[in-house]
Amino acid sequence: MAAPNSTFAIGGVSYSADSLVVAESFVLRINICGKNPAHRKSANYTTFYKNRLKQMKPNNNNSINENYGNQTMEFAFSNKRLYQNLVFGILWLGIGISYFFEQDAKWKYKPYFILAVGILYIILFVFEFKSKYFKITSDRIIINSIPSKQIDLRELTEIKYFSNDYTFKTANKNLKIVKSQINQKQLPKFDYFFDNLKNSLKKNVV
């Protein structure tokens, strides 16, 4: 049996038994203090995902557009429609101006009519560019036409998509949104809204 202060020769170097025990105890303490217990990590991840699920979980309110709160979403016209109006406006203005260089008296009033058509196209372009196609509020869809059209989301009885048209119906009103006239970059956002609204309507009907 070795004495308490006995030494051991390892590789030609002498070591004290007490020093080995102290060193091993010190390393063991470092390892224990330096590591987070497995159950602590697991608890942190569980809390994180529970919080994420709470954020993603919709509220169970009776409102059919419950997932969208009080935010207002605006959807612009497609670039194709906007640029068509702009090009037609410039074209008609150019044709109207060209008539003033004609000497024929029979074109006396025609240039003014053509200029008026060109100006109307330009005004339409500016109006649609600024006011957007339609907007969705917390309780209704509003189309920015003259006059404006709107429908109450709380009174919907049916919504459907058919032949490039999104149709919203209540007991006494129909409203259509043309898919090809929605800005392509915003179309996925509207499709997401439409699908969620459709599912909510089905749940309420059942």
Image (spheres, rainbow, N blue to C red):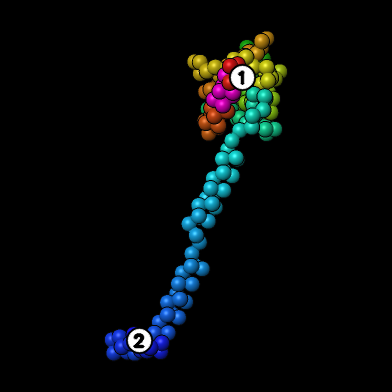
Q: Residues within 10 Å of mark 2 (few under 14, many from 20)?
A: few
Q: Name the residue type under label 2.
A: Ala
> Most extreme residue toward the front, as rendered?
1
Q: Is residue 15 left or right of residue 87?
A: left
Which residue lies at the image location 45% right of the left edge and 81% below the top edge?
A: 22
Q: Which residue is mark 1?
A: 204
Residue range of the region highlighted in magenta in the rendering: 195-202
Q: Residue 157 in the image: x percent, y percent? A: 62, 14
Please identify the quarter of the rendering in which residue 127 is found.
top right
Q: Name the residue type under label 1.
A: Asn
> Which corner quadrant holds the N terminus?
bottom left
Q: Residue 113 in the image: x percent, y percent? A: 65, 16
Q: Residue 46 in the image: x percent, y percent? A: 53, 48
> Which mark sits nearer the N-terminus, 1 or 2?
2
The main secondary structure of the magenta stretch is helix
Please identify the quarter of the rendering in which residue 148 is found.
top right
Which labelled disc corresponds to residue 74?
none
In the figure, 2 relative to 138: above or below? below
Which residue lies at the image location 64% right of the left edge and 32% below the top edge?
A: 59
Q: Residues within 10 Å of mark 1 (few under 14, many from 20)?
A: few
Which dot, 1 or 2, sits closer to the camera? 2
> Which corner quadrant holds the C terminus?
top right
Helix or strand or loop: what does disc 2 sit on? loop
Q: Which residue is mark 2?
A: 2
Verify CB contact (< 8 Å) between mark 1 and mark 2: no
